[in-house]
Amino acid sequence: MSADGTRATRPTRSDYVAWRTVTTRWRDDDAYGHLNNATYYELFDTAVNAHLYEATGLDVRSLPQIGVVAETSCRYFRELGFPEPIETGLVVDKVGRSSVVYRIGLFQGASDEAAAEGRFVHVYVDNARGAGDRPVAPLPDAIRAAVEPLLR
């Protein structure tokens, strides 16, 4: 880690645990012919939540506590775009009492180095009260079981 808490080196495929391939679409590109910035964040959200659905076998939206996004960021290293598919790599940096910190690498083509890396923080709140509520602990057991194998 660097002094400001970010990873000092460009991430590689070996930094991630769970993988998913997504298809790019014509509309994902912006007027300059590369992936629109908002699409990177959609890919981060999809990588995290698709993993949770598959690993838990549950509709995570119906749990008593739900994860809401409290923080997200992206480091861009090179352009991505249509028509090549994108591989998303997922890893967990921290599992707290009421939160999970993920990193998501985006890869396109044969390169071992990520084209972008996102940071994505879920904070768990009471599903009945919603995102404006305070965090609740502990994490649901099913979520903890789904994310702990991704810790590095």
Image: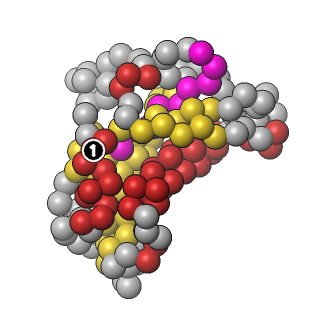
Q: Secondary structure at mark 1?
A: helix
Q: Is residue 116 left or right of residue 36?
A: left
Give the quarter of the figure containing the C terminus.
Answer: top left
Give whichever of 46, 32 is nearer the camera: 46
Q: Is residue 1 left or right of residue 10?
A: left
Residue positioned most to the bottom: 128
- Residue 43, percent across and down? 57, 44
Which color scheme does this rendered protein use? Answer: secondary structure
Which residue is painted at 37% across and 34% down in the image?
17
- Residue span colored magenta: 102-110
| Total count of labels | 1
Which residue is painted at 25% across and 58% down in the image?
144
Circle 1 is placed at which residue position? 149
Q: Main secondary structure of the magenta part?
A: strand
Q: Quadrant of residue 33?
A: top right
Give whichever of 25, 30 is nearer the camera: 25
Label 1: how many Cα within 10 Å (few below 14, some 14–19, many 20+):
few
- Residue 18, percent across and down? 42, 39
- The amino acid type of the residue labelled 1 equals Pro
- Judge whether residue 103 is colored magenta: yes
Which residue is painted at 44% across and 22% down in the image?
13
Give the quarter of the figure containing the N terminus.
Answer: top left
- Residue 84, percent across and down? 72, 28
Q: Is residue 5 left or right of residue 71?
A: left
- Could one spot residue 3 in this view of the protein? yes
- Could one spot residue 133 in this view of the protein? no
Give whichever of 141, 42 is nearer the camera: 141
Give whichever of 15, 146 is nearer the camera: 146
- Residue 82, percent across and down? 76, 31
Which residue is painted at 46% across and 56% down in the image?
54
